[in-house]
């Protein structure tokens, strides 16, 4: 397990490939990593405090965010394919243009998040709170699992729900 201080030191020294790094429980609240060369794929942020962090244009493929505080996080244009957000708080997150294919958001709070131009194809959103979230009216939820999701306050008139589970 790597501490927040150790991670920040290595990052500030120019290291950019942190594939598989274990950052369980770290507190990086308020830090900004707007760096398209930063690779955190398959990293473990289990239980971490990442509120108000900027991970814009970062490779976060397959990352584990289980139980993490991601409130007000910025994930603009980041690759989050196959990431696990189980039981995480993403309220007021800014995730415009993020790649989320095959990610797992089971039992996540996404209320008041900005999810414009996000593709939810094959994403697990079971039990997710999407209330008052900013979505494009033509959002793609094809093959997504929306079982027991809270969709109140959303304009979904043009959304694509082909083969989605809405039970």
Image: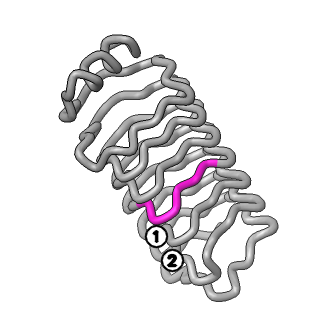
User: Which residue is label 2 attached to?
Assistant: 140
Q: Residue at x 35, y 20 (%)?
A: 8
- For residue 101, say whether it is visible: yes
Question: What's the magenta region?
Answer: 93-98
User: Which residue is label 1 attached to?
Assistant: 119
Q: Distance between the residues labelled 2 and 1?
A: 5 Å
Classify the position of the N terminus by image quarter. Answer: top left
Q: In which quarter of the image is residue 133?
A: bottom right
Callout 2 secondary element: loop
Q: Which residue is drawn at 61% across and 48% down?
A: 93
Q: Which of 123 and 59 is in front in this view?
A: 59
In the figure, is residue 127 to the left or right of 155?
Answer: left
- For residue 100, say whether it is visible: no
Q: Which residue is drawn at 42% across and 49% down?
A: 56
Q: Quadrant of residue 101?
A: bottom left
Q: Residue 22 appears at what percent x and percent y?
A: 31, 21
Callout 1 secondary element: loop
Q: Earlier in the sequence, mark 2 or mark 1?
A: 1
Find out whether residue 48 is within the magenta segment: no
Dot 2, how many residues are within 10 Å of its Cα: few (below 14), some (14-19), or many (20+)?
many
In the figure, is residue 153 to the left or right of 138?
Answer: right
In the figure, is residue 35 to the left or right of 89?
Answer: left
Dot 1, how many residues are within 10 Å of its Cα: few (below 14), some (14-19), or many (20+)?
many
Q: Which of 146 and 33 is in front in this view?
A: 33
| Above or below: residue 121 compared with residue 63 | below
Q: Does the magenta stretch mainly form a helix, a strand or a loop? A: loop
Find out whether residue 97 is within the magenta segment: yes
Q: Residue 134 appears at what percent x and percent y?
A: 68, 66
Q: Nearer the viewer, residue 133 or 83?
A: 133
Q: Quadrant of residue 39?
A: top left
């Amino acid at each position: 397990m790597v501490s927040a201080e150790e991670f920040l030191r290595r990052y500030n020294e120019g290291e950019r490939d942190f594939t598989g790094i274990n950052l369980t429980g770290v507190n990086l609240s308020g830090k900004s990593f707007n760096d398209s060369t930063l690779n955190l794929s398959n990293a473990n942020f289990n239980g971490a405090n990442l509120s108000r962090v900027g991970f814009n244009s970062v490779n976060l493929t397959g990352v584990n965010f289980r139980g993490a505080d991601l409130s007000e996080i910025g994930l603009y244009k980041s690759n989050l394919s196959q990431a696990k957000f189980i039981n995480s708080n993403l309220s007021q997150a800014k995730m415009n243009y993020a790649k989320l294919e095959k990610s797992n958001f089971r039992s996540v709070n996404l209320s008041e998040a900005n999810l414009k131009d996000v593709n939810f194809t094959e994403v697990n959103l079971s039990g997710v709170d999407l209330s008052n979230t900013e979505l494009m009216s033509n959002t793609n939820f094809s093959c997504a699992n929306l079982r027991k999701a809270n969709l109140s306050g959303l304009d979904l008139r043009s959304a694509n729900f082909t083969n989605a589970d809405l039970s």
